[in-house]
Amino acid sequence: MIHPFENPTFLAPARSSGLQVPNYGPPVLLAAVFRKAMLLAGSTLLVTMMLAGCDSRPPSGSGRLATPITSSQRSSIDTAMDYLSRLEDFEPQQGMMQVAYQLNRWLESASDSDMWEPSPLLEDLPSTLRDLPPLSRLDKREITLDDVLYLREASWMQSISQWVSEWEDPIENNDWLDALEQSRGEPHAHEVGLAIHLFDWTVQNIQLNPLLDFPKSEGAPPGIDPVYWPLYQAQPGPGYRTWPWQTLLFGRGDAWQRARVFAGLARQQEIDVVVLAVAASDPSDRPRPWLTAALIDDELYLFDPQLGLPIPGPETGSIATLDQVRQNPALLRNLDVRFPDRALVYPIQAEELDRLVVLLDAGPEAFSYRMHRIESQPTSSPPLVLAIQPQRLISRLAESDLQQVRLWETPLETWIYRNTVTRRAEEDPELMRYLLLEEWIFENDMPLARGRQLHLRGRFDQENGRDGAKAQYLRARIPDAKIAQIGRSPQIRQELGIVRGRQNDLQWQVYLQSTEQILIRAKQNASLWLGLIHFATGRHEDARDWFQIRCLDAHETGPWTPLARDNLARLYEQSNDLVTARDLYLLTPKDSPQEHGNLLRARFLRQRIESSPKRP
């Protein structure tokens, strides 16, 4: 098998007019890409001032440590995991390099007493995926940048799942969860409630992008599997445009990307979440993913990331299990929404429930010797779930009459796509500009990027003299009047640290316009995320102001309008103003990927309104 990454002729520059640039997802740019980005920008100060709202010096109280921690009295793995748990306190690259260095020191001296072997499920993958470079080094003992990114992703997931686990149960599920505790026991009900929280966090924080069709394959050269050729051409498709850690950073993703975030959060709480898919009639075709299912004891509870809703069960406030849906497929028909001129039909039919297969979401690192060794080693830091054990999961799923279990191809497709996008950017100035302005800005040391990472950690307020996420977000919110004067005010440019380099007049104007766009987008992001922090911490009046005034009123059709409106509706739900909440859900546009789910939410609220006692 010939791999395009081993033959550069297969990676010819994409035509600017024909390349479909993906919507979101920050890559870690290669050094060569970074250098070309700097030349394209005309000045390294573009990166320095991005989202800063100040000069290039780090803001006081930003949380950066003056010197790294030492390991004189601690083992290398303890030092590495300590760095990992607080990477936000270091220069972005410094902390990650220290994690790799300390783990490699530990692996050099670690014994090989633990038994490890690659999962047999890997053999069932198509040869193009099975032979990808990350799967060829599963037994290696050296930590790479990809490994550190995977570890950081798991650490972020662990932090989020921990602070979200402290939420109160949704009022609409309370009675059912109480009954579930009586019938199945407290541990079972607790895990179901925790799965509800983690799914709700995913829906509230990851704005839904459209789920694209898998691109059609055309013109694949000899020796290249035509199925995957579009990925090597950087054509966007379903689920694979970003890694889960990128989806977290950007707060956007399609239904499959939402599924991966939910599964990652649940994994850190030792809850197995799988993807249920419908097998194609032609065995050579890929299964069609349906929804996520949380395996708790012997039950699979169904959560649909496309709808943004759990599948309602037969009892009020309940979540359906796979067994219940199989026994009563009418539960799925309750999810149809019909209008006089059109219908939103839930896309699973009763006969398809007999053709379900299980897809396991796992990146290549999860099968490696390295993650197995790290996970099995006790440390002083909170434990991370890093390795996947398919055989244990297969044994549990057998009780649910799901005999066919396979690896989801999306994580490996993501590897192909992200590497392709990064390499193509070296030759395509348009794509390079996109990556610089839309993606790479989250991989720097400026307030918005730092605030977002602190947000994921649950570090909202100042701690030990170091700013939390809220202060960083506020620093990223440059006043509109100041942004508008960047092009004509040398004083404002000096204040923001914008210095002209060797650009000609045209390049300088493009540079200033790009800077304005970056700062406007940063302000919009910070406004939404401040609202989400206030919502998560129970400051509902403050959250309402951020969603309504600074998101919806300030930008009627802004990039965060759908998520701001949906979270505003949830706030009204929690304050028992169900009529206002329902009206907000009904405002969802017809072309929104969240329309079907929001119309169902409006229906459920109408039912609650009609069943509630009438006031005299």
Image (cartoon, grey):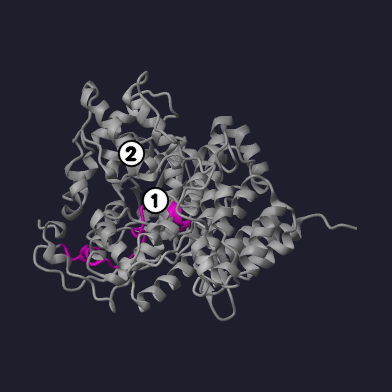
* Residues at marks 2 and 1, CA–CA distance in whole angstroms: 24 Å
* Residue, far bottom: 341
The residue at which mark 1 appears reads as 244
Residue at 38% of width from left, 36% of height from top?
396
Q: Is residue 554 above or below residue 459?
A: below
From the viewer's perspective, is 17 left or right of 86? Answer: left
* Residue, far right: 616
Towards the viewer: 491 or 322: 491
Element assignment for label 1: helix
Give amino acid for label 1. Answer: Pro
Disc assigned to residue 200: none
Horizontal and vertical percent position of residue 211: 41, 65
User: Badge 2: few (under 14), some or many (20 or more) residues near its Cα, within 10 Å?
Assistant: some
Give amino acid for label 2. Answer: Ile
Q: Residue 186 appears in which quarter of the rendering?
A: top right
Q: Is residue 204 visible?
A: no
From the viewer's perspective, is 234 left or right of 123? Answer: right
Residue at 58% of width from left, 48% of height from top?
471
Q: Is residue 294 visible?
A: yes
- The quadrant in which the C terminus is found is bottom right
Q: Is residue 58 above or below residue 83?
A: below
